[in-house]
Amino acid sequence: MKPFRNAFEAIKRLLRKLGGKKEPEAPVQEPQIPETPEVPEEPKVSEEEAKKQQEEAMKEAAAKIAAAEEASQKAAEKAAGKAGSDKGKKQGGKPQQQKKQTFQSTIDEAEKAEQKKYEEEVKKRAERAAKREEKEAQHDTKKVVDPVTGEEIELNALPEEAVFLKKYMKLPTTSNDILVTMNSIVKHPDMPKNIVILGKNGFGTVKVGEDFARSFFACGLVKSDKIAKIKAKQLNKIGLEKLSGLKGGCLIIENAGLVSFDKLVDVIKNSAPDQNDYVVILTGEIDSIANFFEENPEIVDAFIYLIDIHRISEVGMANLARGYIKEKGYKADKDVIDKLKASLKTMEVGNIDRFIELIDGGMAKCDTREEVSGNTRKELAVADF
């Protein structure tokens, strides 16, 4: 069955869009999936912390009221003189008692105001959380065109087993590409699972390929957890017998636009289900891969799925860091995330491989530090990076 579309067609659409050219009309239009805006995550405040903040605010308000009452009382006593003060005492201290009652009433009102403010904030947070859940639920049932059949299918959430891909779900465009790919592959497990991952020139996207390979195995879409990574120029020089041990796994080719046509044709044949049955994942820069497919149309239909990650921003990288840290079971506060964002100045924004390598290094330092101190909280610190 010839696919309704393939990765090369998607690349050509991207190039037309980047070049500002209008895409020619086609018999069937691919629906546009609304991109999720990259919004920094709102700092989470626990109920206990919120309550503590409320109590501190109430104490501060009470202290201010007490100081104001004391100043007012002193001024009144000075103005009335000793006689007025003695009269007040003879009357059984009623003015002082009234002042105490007024003071207590003011405190009660302040406490009520702070409590109301706290309750309103809790209500707002609950409403925002409900809206987020509603949006996610709507996104999960979005209708899209299946790239294999051209039929409408529901854009469901990632399979639970695909934990390695969850960190990319807050990246617009990329998250949609991943969801469409996984939905379609699950629906058509007998079709080619080969994918193309686009990154900017020189940017690392091998890590994304590894995450797909691990997710394929976890979801039962491939038979082996074996992953082979190789650069295109290196692949050009080796014989296919070197890939015999990869049976049932995944092959990731870096800078795929530089692989020779004859070699890739041999690799595609070698990866067939009746041969070594492995998935081929091409990673590289959009222009070089586009040129490669343009010159070698015979292999175009072997690659149906495209993952576009070449437009990732700094905010997207921060979201990626949060997801990866959570995936690995660590914790990071705002200062750590800010430090990681600052580190992007020393590397290309969008270079996922280098960014993940940096985070891995920080996790290793955290483990060493916590082992010495005797705790295992896995809380990353700024000093770890």
Image (cartoon, grey):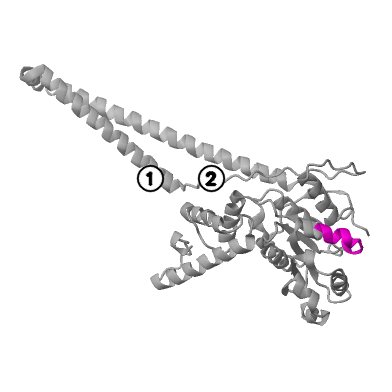
Q: Nearer the viewer, residue 76 or 227?
A: 227
Residue at mark 1 to residue at mark 2: CA–CA distance:
19 Å
Does residue 228 show up magenta in the picture? no
Amino acid carrying label 2: it is Glu
Residue 56 point in image, percent of width and height: 34, 41
Give the mark nearest the N terminus, 1 or 2. Answer: 2
- Badge 1 marks a residue whose secondary structure is helix
Amino acid carrying label 1: it is Lys
Total tally of numbered discs in the picture: 2
Does residue 144 lie above or below 378 as drawn? above
Residue 125 point in image, percent of width and height: 53, 40
Q: Residues within 10 Å of mark 1 (few under 14, many from 20)?
A: few
The image's mark for residue 42 is: 2
The residue beneath circle 1 is 52
Does residue 367 lie above or below 343 as drawn? below
Q: Nearer the viewer, residue 382 or 248?
A: 382
- Badge 2 marks a residue whose secondary structure is loop
Asked if residue 327 can be seen in this view, the reply is no
Stretch in magenta: 290-300
